[in-house]
Amino acid sequence: MSAASISSGPCNYDMVPFPGFQALDVFGPLDALNLLSLRQPMTLSLIASTLDPVSTKPISAPMNPHTSNFSQSVVPTHTFAAPPPSLDVLIVPGGLGTRAPAPALADLIAFIKDSYPTLQHLITVCTGAGLAARAGVLDGKRATTNKAAWNATTALGPNVEWVPRARWVRDGNVWTSAGVSAGIDVTLAFVAEVVGTETAAAVANTMEYERHVDPSWDPFAELYHLGE
């Protein structure tokens, strides 16, 4: 790889999976970043409560009415108690697990709150915005989230300026996306901003992904009857 192919941008990326995370919330952004890592030096850490595998499996029987045995797991590299020494970009996914009782998510929410002041960027996907809202780091900021879970998620952040019609929203160093697949678009928008538009386009083309470049594109706001 030539020196000319190495771009600027953050080096240390951190994802925080939790039981019941949404698969694409994690793997969509990570696939885009996997491709970016072939162009410049980057490090990925997966941080969770313990080093045990973390599964997408629904966290309660009512969330799995057909008792399906269909899930995927990731293996953390670090714990909240012993995180990597440098955190540049923290990515918070969503999923059914965000509906867990408060004690089950207390260490994750505390980690978001404690980490935010030193981060270069915070990215939330889907209902991950609700976790960031509970951590207080979205207070006074514009943000969006999954439109299918709009009412429940926005209720977690009464001091957040929620934007109902948005594929993603950027407010300073905080990037929040709408539901699930929107995590790919916010990640590519982030890459375009911090590395370059040509690099973001190259990553999207390699994925054969037709990205949405307009952050206000949001047919799901209308689908779920959300106004401005």
Image: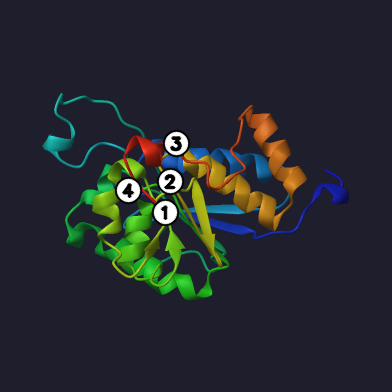
Res 57 visible = yes
The mark that comes first in sequence, 1 or 3, is 1
Kind of residue sitting beneath label 1: Thr
Quarter of the image that includes the N terminus: top right
Kind of residue sitting beneath label 2: Ala
- Mark 2, secondary structure of its residue: loop
**Comparing labels 2 and 4, the label whose residue is closer to the camera:** 2
**Comparing labels 3 and 2, the label whose residue is closer to the camera:** 3
The residue under label 2 is 178
The residue under label 3 is 219
Which class describes the residues within 10 Å of circle 3: few (<14), some (14-19), or many (20+)?
few
Residue 219, horizontal then vertical, whole percent: 44, 36
The mark that comes first in sequence, 1 or 2, is 1
Kind of residue sitting beneath label 3: Pro
Res 20 visible = no
Q: Residue 52 carries which label?
A: 4
Kind of residue sitting beneath label 4: Asp
**Proximity of marks 2 and 4: CB atoms separated by less than 8 Å:** no
- Mark 1, secondary structure of its residue: loop
